[in-house]
Amino acid sequence: MEYECRRGPVQRIVVFQERGSGEKKIAGIELYSPGCFELEVVSLDDPLPSLIDDPEKYLPKELNADLVLGFLRHPDLSTELLRRCQKENIPFVASSKKYPVSPQVATPPI
């Protein structure tokens, strides 16, 4: 089955993942909507401390995105990413199967 994207401006999605945690989702986006999205993947592959006092040093300085997908397992990083997305009015969707108290979805004010 071949999928076609609606023609229009290409949306920019930034995906944050920890140790490959978003690879299946990234592959799905590329398979089912080729050319529809500009993907940037930010991978954190090194072991992380249990408590992160300065999460900014693990994340890029700027978020240039129409949508942010978060597959980060560390709650300190997910919380900081949510804070930044809200500040910049960027929709944020996060997987939190293992951490039910983590943020899951945040949309900018309408």
Image (spheres, grey):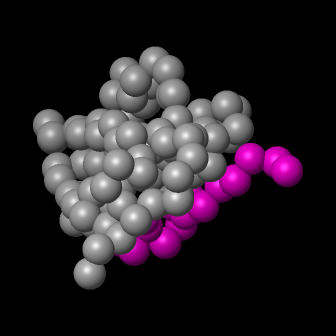
Q: Nearer the viewer, residue 8 or 39?
A: 8
Q: Is residue 77 visible?
A: no
Percent coordinates x, y for residue 11 in the rendering: 51, 43
Please state the horizontal and vertical placement of residue 51, each as a whole percent of the image. 36, 40
- Type of secondary structure dominating the magenta stretch: loop
Q: Position of residue 101 (x, y in %)?
A: 53, 66
Residue drawn at the location 52% of the way across and 35% of the way down: 65
Tell me what residue is drawn at x 60 percent, y 61 percent: 105
Answer with left or right where residue 106 lies relative to residue 6: right
Give the residue drawn at x 39%, y 40%. 38
Whether residue 46 is situated above or below residue 70 in the rendered picture: above
Look at the image and tell me in which quarter the N terminus lies: bottom left
The answer to which quarter of the image holds residue 39 is top left
Q: Is residue 34 above or below residue 46?
A: below
Q: Residue at x 49, y 42 (%)?
A: 10
Q: Is residue 68 covered in magenta?
A: no
Nearest the camera: 74 or 106? 106
Image quarter for residue 5? bottom left
Disc tally is 0
The extreme bottom residue here reads 1
Horizontal arrangement in the rendering, residue 24 relative to residue 102 (left or right)? left
Depth check: give the residue in front, 1 or 41.
1
Instruction: In the displayed orientation, state which residue is furthest to the right.
Output: 110
Q: Which residues are magenta?
A: 95-110
Whether residue 14 is situated above or below residue 71 in the rendered picture? above
User: Is residue 97 at all visible to an observer of this figure?
Assistant: yes
